[in-house]
Image (cartoon, rainbow, N blue to C red):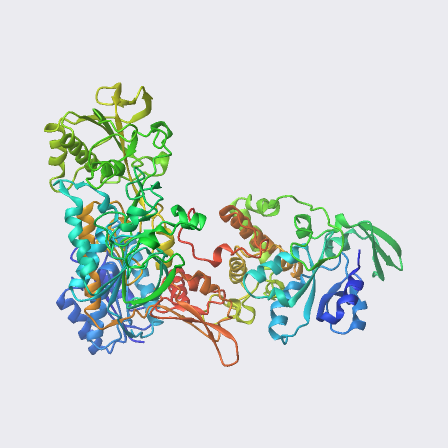
Amino acid sequence: MKTLHSHLEDHFEELELVIGWEIGFEPLRATPAFVRRREDLARLVWNPLCAPNLSVYLPQILKSAEKTEKKVAVCLKGCDTRSLTALIQEGFVDRERLHVIGLPCPGTVDPQALAQARKNRAPVTQVSFQDNLLILHSYEGTEEIPLDSVLARRCRRCRQPNPLLADVVLGDPVPARCDAPSFAHVEAVDSLPLEERRAYWERELDRCLRCYACRNACPLCVCRDRCLAESRTPKWTTQRDSVRDKFLFHMIHALHLAGRCTECGECERVCPVGIPVALFKEKMAQIALDLWDYQAGVDPAATPPLQTFDPSETGI
Amino acid sequence: MRIGVFVCQCGTNIASTVDTGAVAQRALDYPDVVFATDYMYTCSEPGQQEIQKAIAEHRLQGVVVAACSPRMHEATFRRAVEKAGLNRYMFEMANIREHVSWIGQDKGANTLKAMELVRMAVEKLRRNEPLFASEVPINKRVLVIGGGVAGIQAALDCADAGLDVVLVEREQSIGGKMAKLDKTFPTIDCSSCILGPKMVDVAQKENITLHAYSEVEAVSGYIGNFTVKIRKKATYVDWDACTGCGLCMEKCPSKKTVDRFNENLGTTSAIQIPFPQAIPKKARIQKDACRYFATGKCKVCQKICPTNAIHYDMEDREVVEEVGAIIVATGYDLFDPAPYGEYGAGRYPDVITGIQFERILSASGPFGGHVKRPSDGKEPKDIVFVACVGSRDKSVDRPYCSGICCMYIAKQAILARDHLPGVQCYVFYMDIRSPGKNYDEFVRRAIEEYGVQYIRGRVGKIYPRGDRMVVQGADTLLGAQVEVEADLVVLATGVESSRGAKELAEKLRISYDQYGFYMESHPKLRPVETNTAGVYLAGACQGPKDIPASVAQGSAAASKVLALFARDTIATDPQVAGVLESVCIGCGKCLSVCPFGAIQWKTLRDGSRKAEVLETVCQGCGLCNATCPPKAIQLKHFTDDQILAELDALCA
């Protein structure tokens, strides 16, 4: 099997840009990397810390980049390829200009879960991975933590660890954790009595800072700088720091994603205050599945159900 | 803005359960309201003058009338404020009759609700903007789709009024289902004798362009200016040269071709003119039956044709017609009785459908008008008719009544007795539905003068015994099982929507019901209009109909077109979608959901793509607005901000 580095070395002449991950401000953080020079390829990493869904950058990069013969290479995990598929369906990304490197994914790490799982307190100086184990080195010593115990919520309900769409797949296929769409987390909240559910969301959303990180990380957010949350005409929300306005913003984001969200979970991952905002979108995905038997981002040729007018549609 | 509020008492309709004076008084507290009053009948002439007087006296810039449904009087009041110098869209209506006084008894609660509705109307009006209609010229040509009796009537009426008419017919000849009928109820006049002259008229009118054996491929444009692509299917015969002499049919060696015009009861040649009265009377080669197309040899028709009209290399051709209005008269199809396995249609040659019996009765039919049974050509002694095959039956997804079967059974039973005086006819029926003029008398005649035996009950099973058929059913009046032996069984198959009806509806952007029948704009008050401006309906494409009703609708649709064409231009409704270009992100979702094709791309000078609304095509449905993520596309007169302001007023 070719490694990411050797593959990119071999094809670098055909590429204008490589979007991947590199080690960030600390060894436990992998951040997006944009590589234009061959010597920078060495910076790229691929491991369970590579959480960001890089497809989010594609519409803007392809729009601003000069059209050349060279392609833009992008590293995508299984779930990320669903986002790309949705972007292709909606015409935001020209598939021909991409070189998609598909990466079968063992799951990504939830930093908070990892912090709790650690016994040592000292800053991690080095991380390595072996057989589904995270090996963390610090001056207090070395500790081994099973990956399965520190997975992000989205990865625990993952059913697409392997790329659905790629020019090259690097790595062996990984077994999926779920065979069928799992909405257990949504159903747990749904099953609460109305008043409790309301109290739950009021409690959760009270923490919302309206920083819009969830929106900015969403690969399928199409409005970009024309967001209704900041618009004065029409004026759907105010800038008040009330749960009501926060709730309305999250509802707008969720409704914009109805029948489109590929459940990549980025919104929830980037939330600085840990609100499970992906639950809203998972609810939408559940409804889309029930109503139209539709899963977003699976078939590039499909038309998302709310992006068409079909007078023969019944049952809605 | 200076707003005046007028609360209508509607006699006692509103005033009995709403304190209209209090509503008016309260309105004076709302922002921008400078005048408020209540009045006995605001829609009356003096009521309207009251509004106009107040506009002048109080320099009003907008008017709210709290009265009945806007469907009732919105147009009245818009005209009234326009006469007083305001823009007609600087007017709002609060419905405090249908929505308040008529539905609640509690005067206190009603008054409160009326106040809230007035407040919402005021908040909306504060954000109204003057809107102006634009005028577009009308192309005074009309397209009629379907050349059955409804389409023929519509085409002739339009042509008589001097319009250019384009008539498109899918089959080789116009005439539709009526051309296949022998006689018509309740007068027993010959179908082709009354339809024939109309068909000839179509051929002779110089201002009717007939595209037979053609289909509508695509429709674009809008009321007054449609562009229609029509595919003329290859006939392999040059119709300009063909004289309809029929020599080719005589000499064609492929005589075993199933005769579709005769409902598969006989055979015909591969090159064919479907029936003697066909319009246009031109030959066509049925490609799958033709020996030349199968083997590359034969060419008998080409050799024999006196005008050299045969061209085996002919291909489908596309023509484009520009029209200002479209009449859809695509008719119906008959239910295929195959789902009723217990009746054995298709399995037993002597179990036939009503339309097949019609061909058997016809002098130009497969047996020359002799009533014989298909299996052995014997004259039947007993005929059983089974009503409601594919009508009023949920189990085959046809819960509706086809409306024509009761009558055509009675007619066919009478005709069978006329042809063969010794024949005994039985009819199994659920109910007899004969509500037309002279219809019930006709059914009574069948029963009383022609001795047709009507048995009320459903048929359970039909099976052969010897060379006859046994019809087993219930007689629900006797409360007993009955068994009738018959030589011929006629299944009165019901009406269903024409094949391809849904696809055509999508091209025309008109709606249809779950069975594929086209939806009229209003079931009572706009029966031949569709919700797409400039597209009208005639005949059974809208629902099962008999000949008189189809003809009436053909004329009705024609009169709608003539009313439209009486003007040279058409004013467009300005309550349509509009794009805030600075907000549009060019995602194209509005284009993909628009049912009317009213949105197109526009490229700005910086190369960015924005949505653009074709105001004359837009019907103001608002789907684009609901879909637009940043709400860059707004419905004029119903903008998000207006609706949000109403909600804020309600929740305040």
Q: In this view, does B364 lie above or below B158?
A: above
**Residue A214 image point, x, y percent:** 61, 62
The N terminus of chain B - image quarter: bottom left
For this rendering, which residue is in front, A202 or B581?
Answer: B581
For this rendering, which residue is in front, B413 or A50?
Answer: B413
Badge count:
0
The C terminus of chain B - image quarter: bottom left
**Residue A118 image point, x, y percent:** 80, 53
**Residue A232 image point, x, y percent:** 48, 72
Outermost front residue = B303
Q: Is residue B265 above or below residue B173?
A: above
- Position of residue A57 in the picture relative to residue B246 (left or right): right
Can residue B609 be seen from the camera position used here? yes
For this rendering, which residue is in front, A163 or A182?
Answer: A163
The image quadrant that residue B428 belongs to is: top left
- Position of residue A302 in the picture relative to residue B506 (left or right): right
The image quadrant that residue B445 belongs to is: top left
Q: In this view, does B412 lie above or below A139?
A: above
**Residue A308 image point, x, y percent:** 46, 58
Can residue B227 be seen from the camera position used here? no
For this rendering, which residue is in front, A116 or B247?
Answer: B247
